[in-house]
Amino acid sequence: MEQRSLQIDPKSGFNSLTKTFHSVRPPVHLPPENAFLSAAEYAFSLRAKSPWPDDSVALINSITGQQISYSEFVRRTKSLAAYLQKVTQLFKHDVAFVLSPNSIQVPILYFSLLSLGVIISPANPVATEPEVYGQIQLSKPVIAFATSSTVHKLPKLRHQTILIDSPEFESMMVSSKYEFEHVKLSQSDLAAIMYSSGTTGKVKGVMLTHKNFIAQTAINCAAWEIIRSVALSEKAVVMERFEWKNMLKAVQEFSVTHVALTPPVVLKLSKDGSADGYDLSSLETVICGAAPLGQEAIAAFTARFPKVMLAQGYGLTESTAAVARTIGPEENMKWGSTGKLYAGFEAKVVDPETSEALPSM
């Protein structure tokens, strides 16, 4: 290990012995590997250390303005978990298929399922029936959670489908009739089955553990602290689906500071005159991913929003989320770069024709 460390370039992180790049960011402190801990428990433990009061806002519906505080988020999560455990009788290692647009109910559902040790399998709500069927064949769920607009795409499963936009689901989240029985979970237990894009063939199911999500949570908290933003207890403004004017309206109305956008939207934000009718002065950072952002688009955005940091990153389903990202003004000025590796990551750049590892530039 010592010899290996001596071979690492402190500037690039390149190990000349293994031909592997190591992260040069400060290490992230993770819980002991043998600690019994779910991703939900870990997130709540970070929340407990937050200086922000329990009545601070956690989730906002961008259209209706409905808000859920952190204390209410915790209460609803526990109530729903208790109902699903005692009444629906979902158990550790069961798989739940989720076919729903974005909503402020979805995070509560996810935290409840994670607390139970139920494996979450989220699907795109605009997927076709054959696509949904194929994903169900991969994940083999015992129950599905859907909305009134997506439920028709689902086949019968062991448990009846639960509609998260129904009054019944609302009552599940607020009922105090049942007591949640804590479930002992290892970090190595499966937490989710995500679906790859199918770039190299058919869509594949990607299995992610609680440890995967715990590590990503820790990494992202450390990254936000570096740019002096609030790492914990931020407000999340949730849009059911992306719509240009609704996005601009949400930024203005809720003083949004950080948004994640794709390259086409960044380009439109830079050039579309309709954005001038909205107050976007609260914006501090725009994070762009999913595809490379061209130099022309970066130049246009920077010219129009000189005070807004444009950050880029690279990630994939198999890594849970981002692998690398630009952080802070200096890194964000390197146009076209996806930034440095996040803490704890290693990467190897290979020649696509020979598969030989390539050195540092």
Image (cartoon, rainbow, N blue to C red):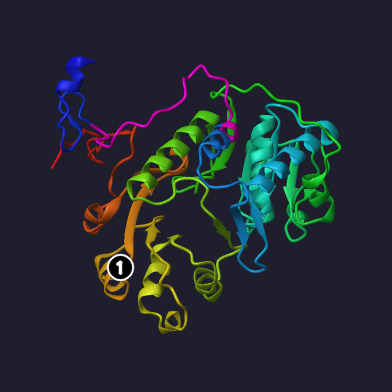
**Residue corresponding to mark 1:** 307
Residue kind at label 1, given as amino acid type: Lys
Q: Is residue 110 toward the left or the right of residue 355 in the image?
A: right
- SS of the residue under disc 1: loop
Prevalent SS, magenta region? loop
Q: Position of residue 16 (x, y in %)?
A: 15, 27
Q: Position of residue 326 (x, y in %)?
A: 30, 50
Q: Position of residue 288 (x, y in %)?
A: 38, 58
**Magenta-drawn segment:** 21-41
Quarter in which the N terminus is drawn: top left
Where is 1 relative to 219, above or below? above
Of residue 256 and residue 89, the one placed in the foreground of this image is 256
User: Quarter-wise, where is residue 183 in the image?
Assistant: top right
Where is 98 relative to 273, above or below? above
In percent of the image, x 28 and y 67: which residue is there?
298
15 within the magenta span: no
Q: Is residue 93 toward the left or the right of residue 204 in the image?
A: right
User: Quarter-wise, where is residue 134 in the image?
Assistant: top right
**Viewer can see residue 142:** yes
User: Quarter-wise, where is residue 88 in the image?
Assistant: top right
Q: Position of residue 356 (x, y in %)?
A: 21, 33
In percent of the image, x 33 and y 65: which residue is there?
308
Q: Is residue 205 toward the left or the right of residue 343 in the image?
A: right
25 within the magenta span: yes
Of residue 192 and residue 307, the one placed in the foreground of this image is 307
